[in-house]
Image (cartoon, rainbow, N blue to C red):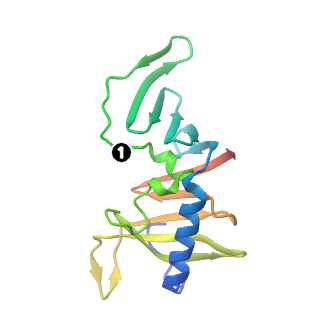
Amino acid sequence: MDEPDETLPPAREAELIALVALVLTRGRHREAAAVVSNGEERFEVAVAPGDRWVVHSSTIEWVGNGASIQAYDTQESLGARRRAEEYPPGWYHPALGLLWPHLLPLWGRAGDAYRPVRIIDGLHGPSGIVCEHVDAPMVGGESLGPWAHVLLTPDRQLTLLEWEGRTWTLLDIHT
């Protein structure tokens, strides 16, 4: 999905704004556990109220609670050992964006790197959103990218996030 599908007509702005608001509202207070893949590795992800989250890969576990983030090297036979790695304030693991889409800089808010520009229509309503980079070069009024894409279920849950050269896919979720 490197380029937008030019055969799709641009969505009416009000419809696009309403869809983004619905996606953000439904995800903001989500409490869930999920399995997410980035094409190379699977991650176990859990989110809870109070900005608490955990992301576990095969070798690292990240734990966030508000402004505090800790990471651990994990090995089944040896247990866990704290990593010395520092994370900047406000950092979240990218896999969290599938459960908490409000963390993603894709929605056109002040400070976001992208803005939504088009709805992808599915058989039963909107099935995705195409976002363009705010500072993308323009030719003839058309953006040259880079692009970000989110695909949605009928209940407006993100199932796929393609952003910054990575594709994150929601494999399973328990709410």
Q: Is residue 103 above or below residue 130?
A: above
Tally of numbered discs: 1
Could you tell whether 89 is left or right of 23 in the image? left
Q: Is residue 83 above or below residue 90?
A: above
Name the residue furthest top.
Answer: 78
Q: Residue at x 48, y 29 (%)?
A: 61
Quarter of the rendering containing residue 153: bottom right
- Secondary structure beneath label 1: loop
Q: Is residue 10 visible?
A: no
Name the residue furthest right.
Answer: 124
In the rendering, at what x and y percent does residue 23 appear? Answer: 57, 64
Q: Is residue 108 visible?
A: yes
Q: Residue at x 47, y 31 (%)?
A: 63
Could you tell whether 145 is left or right of 95 in the image? left
* Of 72 and 111, the residue lying toward us: 111
Label 1, on which residue? 90
Mark 1 residue type:
Gly
